[in-house]
Image (cartoon, rainbow, N blue to C red):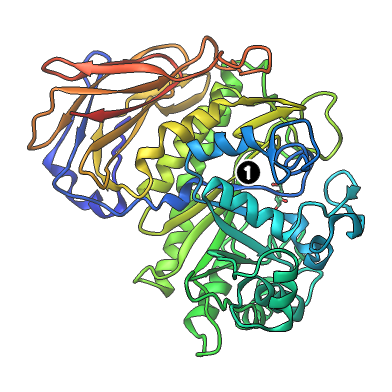
């Protein structure tokens, strides 16, 4: 299978390098003379919902906890997230956001009401972690705030008040209340989601019903903090249904001066069957390949919705924001119902790399994305258990990909070959490359083949590089995981390529990131 990997815009000009794979060796040619779009660092965003142990235990332990914390927020989690340079965190949901009333989460913590979380296990929501705690958390990890406002069960006035409370520098009554609650300065809100899945848990609205809400909320949920521009993200499609994409983009095209948006969201999980039944561990090669095949469908989804958007917005002013993505697998046996806890294996590492590669190749349109979810939920970066913390294989991919944040895509050409198992055929390898702000070239290589190592030869057209070095994430088995007892089972190891042909050998089912020298 010949698979050409490059930004959409270079597809027409690929004839300069026709590559032939020989006896198991794949040539990977970086066309450094033809830079593509910027890989917006916001595609490495996280999603943290009030769901299971995602916030409580995962982020918030309270100032009186014996677990080391800063103002109630776990220090170990903060330092792990700082290391992956999280660009933004989406909060408070998800489905939770459309039932969240922000006033419940401000003021003295011991006076906050106990409410319910009907979406996720029907547990009590103590509202201990509210607006100020979230803003403190994102500031501690150095990320931007991506707030999702309540369109489903809230009102435009409630959303407008929240934004005024957060962002106004003027001494309004709401700003004085913010100051009395400990924060005189206005907060920066970089991204604002106008509802969540309004076609589903966010109100079961038709596209036209949603657009009627969108116009109103996009007008009144104002940002008053001029030091921080805020991008408004409309609810967009569920998977491949283009109904919302068409309706929102048409409304935007025909909009008046009175409202605007800067993005539209796409939600798509790697789930295969509903309800999620693919095991997170203890699976075989067939389930491994099925999940990878399913995750590669992201390419088609992004292309489909981008094509609709191109008809209304050829200048690509509106970003496609994939603000929920990742593997949604069968819950960990014995975990509480509705907590969406699942293990995270080497297969998840490949799911992460393949999706990030797709987003990077579509960097002209995909300018933000949020993996679901950050801690203890779905395809998490981190698991916590009381005072213990463990980093998942997915975390390590995000760590290895840090050099791609805000780098400029460099087209890659390769004959990807075919990895076949049973009746599933997948590309054998995948790759992206980019040039960082300092001018250094980086390449990410993924070997999808669960059985065979892949030998790759790296080349840069028109330039001579003699060394490449970096890290490879491989594992003893495709379902290897990190546990609290064995946190180092799947961790990156050094890898390098040298010699005339810059040859590098990737173990089966592995991801590598290398810098070229
Ligand atoms: O991430 C879990 C849930 O999945 C979110 O709350 C919702 O938006 C989506 O359906």
Q: Residues within 10 Å of mark 1 (few under 14, many from 20)?
A: many
Does residue 500 lie above or below 387 as drawn? above
Residue at x 61% of width, y 77% of height: 168
Residue 235 in view, yes or no? yes
Residue at figure coordinates x 39%, y 20% from the top left:
472
x then y, percent, for residue 174: 73, 78
Q: Is residue 243 visible?
A: no
Q: Is residue 500 left or right of residue 373?
A: left
**In the rendered view, would you say 110 is above or below 435?**
below
Query: Is the residue 514 above or below the residue 140 in the image?
Result: above
Relative depth, front residue between 347 and 491: 491
Looking at the image, residue 81 sits to the left or right of residue 198; the answer is left
Residue 421 in picture, x, y percent from top left = 49, 18
Residue lying farthest bottom? 257
What residue would you read off at disc 1? 372
The number of numbered badges drawn on the structure is: 1
SS for dot 1: strand
Between 344 and 73, which is closer to the camera in this rendering?
A: 73
């Amino acid at each position: 299978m010949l698979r050409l990997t490059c930004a959409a815009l270079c597809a027409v000009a690929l004839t300069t390098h026709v590559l032939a794979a020989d006896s198991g060796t794949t040539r990977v040619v970086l066309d450094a003379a033809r830079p593509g779009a910027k890989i917006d660092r916001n595609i490495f965003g996280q999603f943290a919902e009030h769901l299971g142990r995602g916030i409580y235990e995962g982020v918030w332990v309270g100032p009186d906890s014996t677990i080391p914390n800063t103002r109630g927020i776990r220090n170990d989690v903060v330092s792990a997230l700082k290391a992956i340079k999280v660009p933004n965190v989406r909060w408070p949901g998800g489905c939770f956001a459309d039932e969240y009333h922000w006033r419940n989460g401000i003021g003295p913590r011991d006076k906050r009401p106990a409410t319910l979380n009907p979406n996720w296990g029907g547990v009590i929501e103590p509202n201990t972690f509210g607006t100020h705690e979230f803003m403190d958390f994102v500031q501690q990890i150095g990320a931007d705030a991506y707030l999702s406002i309540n369109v489903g069960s809230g009102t435009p006035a409630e959303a407008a008040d929240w934004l005024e409370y957060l962002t106004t520098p003027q001494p309004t009554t709401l700003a004085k209340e913010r100051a009395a609650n400990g924060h005189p300065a206005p907060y920066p809100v970089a991204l604002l989601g106008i509802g969540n899945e309004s076609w589903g848990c966010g109100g079961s609205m038709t596209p036209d019903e949603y657009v009627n809400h969108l116009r109103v909320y996009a007008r009144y949920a104002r940002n008053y903090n001029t030091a921080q521009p805020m991008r408004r993200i409309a609810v967009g499609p569920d998977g491949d249904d283009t109904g919302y994409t068409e309706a929102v983009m048409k409304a935007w095209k025909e909009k008046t001066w009175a409202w605007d948006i800067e993005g539209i969201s796409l939600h798509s999980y790697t789930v295969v069957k509903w309800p999620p039944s693919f095991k997170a561990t203890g699976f075989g090669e067939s389930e491994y390949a099925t999940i990878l095949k399913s995750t590669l469908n992201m390419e088609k989804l992004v292309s489909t919705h981008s094509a609709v958007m191109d008809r209304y917005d050829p200048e690509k002013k509106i970003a496609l924001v994939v603000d929920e993505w990742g593997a949604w697998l069968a819950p960990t046996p014995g975990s509480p119902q509705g907590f969406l806890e699942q293990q995270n294996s080497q297969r998840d590492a490949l799911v992460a790399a393949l999706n990030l590669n797709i987003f990077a190749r579509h960097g002209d349109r995909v300018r933000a994305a949020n993996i679901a979810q950050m801690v203890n939920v779905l395809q998490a970066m981190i698991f916590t258990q009381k005072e213990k913390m463990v980093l998942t294989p997915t975390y390590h991919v995000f760590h290895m990909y840090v050099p791609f944040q805000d780098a400029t895509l460099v087209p890659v050409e390769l004959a990807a070959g075919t990895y076949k198992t049973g009746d599933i055929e997948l590309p054998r390898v995948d790759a992206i490359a980019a040039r960082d702000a300092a001018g250094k070239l980086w390449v990410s290589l993924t070997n999808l083949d669960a059985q065979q190592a892949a030998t790759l030869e790296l080349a840069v057209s028109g330039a001579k590089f003699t060394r490449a070095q970096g890290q490879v994430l491989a594992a003893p088995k495709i379902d290897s995981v990190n546990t609290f007892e064995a946190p180092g089972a799947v961790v990156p190891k050094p890898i390098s390529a040298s010699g005339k042909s810059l040859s590098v050998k990737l173990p089966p089912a592995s991801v590598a990131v290398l810098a070229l020298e």
